Image: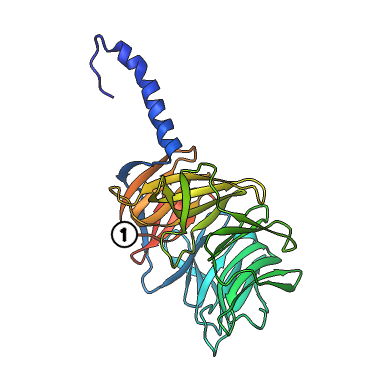
């Protein structure tokens, strides 16, 4: 601040306290600071490639799924990393917990979906259960275990656990909005059932706990998971064993977009809003996805808005003119996303 000298010394002595109080207030109420200009920058055009998924490995290298291939960005261009003959599309892939890829996931009576796991530089195909005709989502626990959620021929859905070269099925929901596995192996699933509840498994599929979304503060009330009623994948992520979910909530009866977090043991979760943006506030747009990088910083991507944290509890709203897709946090720090057929980076 530029302030003139004189009798102002007393005021200067008070300024640190005032600033500190303002920051604490912003953190406690969950309202992000800003808006400021975004730090997102274009890195490279995708050219002829159509990106289905984007991921980072533990070294921070960036990969995209394009057609039936996985390509790696080497700092200058995209180079071939893997190609899957006999398949049209790599729909989803990950390097978390050992790595896996799902191919031709959309329902096609002539082509069955494929699941491949990646370990020690090799891709090995895993035979899927016969009744899975379409893969909707999957989470990797480690190189030998994963969760797969999909539709069957009659459009019923089913959740499967692959472990020890065997599949185990679970029929607890007609539709699952999103799933997540934490670093400790705890699995979370959110069924599309009102009122919403969280299904939690900590012991490789043997015991389940159903937990309602109940906030510690009664002024908050859950409305909807994700930024919209459909296409909410990417609404749930974890940082360590803490779960974060994009949701619309009511704050004293008024609907707001928010990022909420969960701490605690199964059945006793403590739910707290971290970021709150009123729907009708200036520069507020629908929240679509959230990611955390290896330094503990978070970023929420939405329609013409990104909200980034400093890893210490302060969130700042940034103005961005376009919608970001396939948001990922890098283990080495920073964020990657696809926007307008280009690869973007946020330091």
Drawn side of residue 299 relative to residue 317, left or right: right
Residue 89 in view, yes or no: yes
Drawn side of residue 60 relative to residue 315, left or right: right
Q: Residues within 10 Å of mark 1 (few under 14, many from 20)?
A: few
Identity of the residue drawn at 58% across and 71% down: 101
**111 above or below 91?**
below
Q: Nearer the viewer, residue 321 or 270?
A: 270
Residue 122 in view, yes or no: no
- What residue is disc 1 on? 322
At which x and y percent is residue 248? 43, 54
Q: Nearer the viewer, residue 131 or 165?
A: 131
At which x and y percent is residue 228? 41, 62
The count of marks equals: 1
Q: Secondary structure at mark 1?
A: strand
**17 above or below 232?**
above
At which x and y percent is residue 106? 51, 79
At which x and y percent is residue 35? 31, 43
Q: Residue 149 sits in which quadrant?
A: bottom right
**122 above or below 319?**
below
Q: Residue 93 sits in which quadrant?
A: bottom right
């Amino acid at each position: 601040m530029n302030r003139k000298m004189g009798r102002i010394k007393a005021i200067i002595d008070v300024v640190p306290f005032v600033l500190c109080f303002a920051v604490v207030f912003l953190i406690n109420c969950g309202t992000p600071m800003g808006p400021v200009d975004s730090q997102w920058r274009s890195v490279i055009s995708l050219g002829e490639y159509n990106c289905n998924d984007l991921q980072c490995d533990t070294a921070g290298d960036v990969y995209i799924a394009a057609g039936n291939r996985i390509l790696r960005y080497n700092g200058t261009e995209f180079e071939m990393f893997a190609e899957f003959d006999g398949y049209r599309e790599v729909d989803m892939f990950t390097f978390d917990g050992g790595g896996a890829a799902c191919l031709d996931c959309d329902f096609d009576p002539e082509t069955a979906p494929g699941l491949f796991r990646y370990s020690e530089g090799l891709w090995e195909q895993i035979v899927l259960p016969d009744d899975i005709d379409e893969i909707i989502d999957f989470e990797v626990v480690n190189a030998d275990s994963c969760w797969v959620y999909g539709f069957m021929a009659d459009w019923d859905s089913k959740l499967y656990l692959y472990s020890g070269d065997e599949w185990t099925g679970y029929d607890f929901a007609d539709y699952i909005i999103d799933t997540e596995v934490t670093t400790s192996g705890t699995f979370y699933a959110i069924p599309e059932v009102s009122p919403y509840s969280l299904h939690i498994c900590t012991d490789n599929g043997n015991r389940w706990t159903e937990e309602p979304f109940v906030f510690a503060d009664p002024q908050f009330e859950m409305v909807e998971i994700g930024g919209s009623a459909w296409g909410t994948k990417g609404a749930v992520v974890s940082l360590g064993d803490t779960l974060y979910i994009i949701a619309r909530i009511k704050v004293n009866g008024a609907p707001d977009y928010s990022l909420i977090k969960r701490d605690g043991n199964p059945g006793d979760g403590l739910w707290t809003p971290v970021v709150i943006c009123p729907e009708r506030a200036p520069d507020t747009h629908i929240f679509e996805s959230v990611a955390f990088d290896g330094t503990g910083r978070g970023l929420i991507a939405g329609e013409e808005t990104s909200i980034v944290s400093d890893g210490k509890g302060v969130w700042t709203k940034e103005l961005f003119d376009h919608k970001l897709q396939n948001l990922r946090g890098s283990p080495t720090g920073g964020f990657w996303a696809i926007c307008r057929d280009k690869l973007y980076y946020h330091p």
